[in-house]
Image: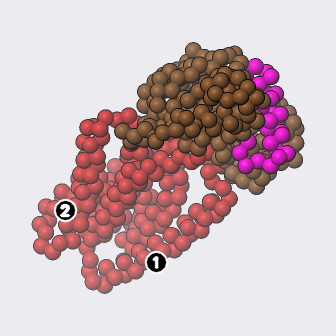
Chain colours: A brown, B red
Amino acid sequence: MVEISVENLTKHYATLVALDNVSLKIGSGEVFGLLGPNGAGKSTLLKILVGILRPTSGTIRVGEYDIVADPEKAKKLIGYLPENPSLYTGLTTMEFLQFVGKIRGVADDLLDREISESLRSFALEEKRNSLVGSLSKGMKQKVALIATSLHTPQVLVLDEPLTALDPKTRVSVKDWIGGQTKRGVTTILSTHDLDVAQTHAGRIAIIDHGKIVAVGDVESLRKMANTASDARLEDVFLQLTEEKGEEPTRH
Amino acid sequence: MRYWVKGRFTRATILGLVIGEFFSIIFILFGSSTYLSFSSRVGLSTGLSEVALSLLLALFLVGLIQSGFNGSGLPVSASDVDYVFTAPVPPREVFAAKVLLNSLTTVLFGFPPIIVLYLRFSAYYHTSWSAAVLAGLVTLVFLVVGLLLSADITLSLGHGLGERKKMWRNLFIVLVMVVSLLPITLLIPGIPAEAADITRVLPNGLAAAVSVGLVTGTAGGSLILRIFCYCLPGSEQS
């Protein structure tokens, strides 16, 4: 399994500092939660981790590979679920999954088997020849989840996996996350859903205005926030982000 | 690659492109017939056709350069960002595939209207259909080179090019745009004939001079056609 190391990561967009000297270490097989208000920098951090964006300074290592210096080797290890995934709507479900599997280097015979099993487990078999554009939001999310894990990644990066899903689909997705984490895959889970974070994540980082406000398990976060030992994570989160609340850094 | 092409060209897109092609061919036939009829009545020289084509190609070039600066010289969809750029594929291969796809699309959908235009001219000037085809290829080469320039501009904007180098590069591109529009001066009455020679060394001027020369059967065009036929395999027999 694979560790993730983020060191002094900074990202500027013109005068706006989206990430300000962020450092994290995520152990092998750990499930790591990333919480923060909208615009805190969660998605920016994840996009740099998966190679979509380049950092202004700092490093991210996935295992032994630097995502900037060795992007192809690092990306081979990562399965990424974007927030609001943009699937190729002109392809059928089967074609889309075959496309993703092939560009991620999955062998053809293994790929067909993986896709069939995954479609069966998500009850999407009858949609295999339907255009992706015709699927409901929940179905598209399931297809995106399948695409995330086709190449059996050692690291999962999940950006808001439960957003705008109906309750039944949320249960499916939560079960899927649980299954992946049981396999010992190093997982970074960015979510607004505090229940999911509390249930699945061993440690949680709270990010606000581009800075890491607090990192630790739920118990240590409660102590940092000076809340009661049975305080809800929501109260801890609000306490910590209100304490550290400040204007976004601009240069 | 075939999934990527299929994902981009949905049925609706292809239908739209085919309908667009049909109407552009009709428009070109109508427009070129009107122009040729008018030019024969008032005795316009082929030089004006050359200027007109040169300006048209210059406008295309300016448009392509502008789209390069807008970031649409190499269009990247949200799906590409989520699934291709996160895959272990070198970005250089992705961009090369995109440029190839754009160029092939341009050739596939650009060739019919261009060849119809030149065939119409070649029918009027009684030159061979092969001259029209060659003229079409010359114009397409110019357009594809413009596409490559546009893609290069878009790519370099996102790259970590130094600010100073970017400034010089931008100045150079503006200069290319200004120079490409020089053929406009040929429309000024009393402009010396040497100005036409100067515009013929510009990429768009050269492409226009060669293409128009081929379809109108001028001395230069006939020479180019003869050279091209000579270079074809088996041409020693003919």
Q: Quadrant of residue B126?
A: bottom left
Residue A182 belongs to magenta span: yes
The chain carrying label 2 is B
The chain carrying label 1 is B
Q: Of the residues shown, which amino acid type is indicated by label 2? A: Ala
Q: Which of disc 2 and disc 1 is earlier in sequence?
A: 1
- Relative to B204, is A77 above or below? above
Q: Which residue carries the number 1 mark?
A: B30
Q: Secondary structure at mark 2?
A: helix
What residue is rendered at 52% in x and 43% in y?
B98
What residue is rendered at 51% in x and 74% in y?
B26
Q: Are marks 1 and 2 in contact (CB under 8 Å)?
A: no
Q: Which residue carries the number 2 mark?
A: B196
The magenta span reads: A162-187
Q: Quadrant of residue B130?
A: bottom left
Label 1, label 2: how far apart the Cα atoms are = 28 Å
Q: Quadrant of residue A14?
A: top left
- Relative to A17, is A110 above or below? above
Residue B168 belongs to magenta span: no
* Image label count: 2
What residue is rendered at 66% in x and 46% in y?
A84
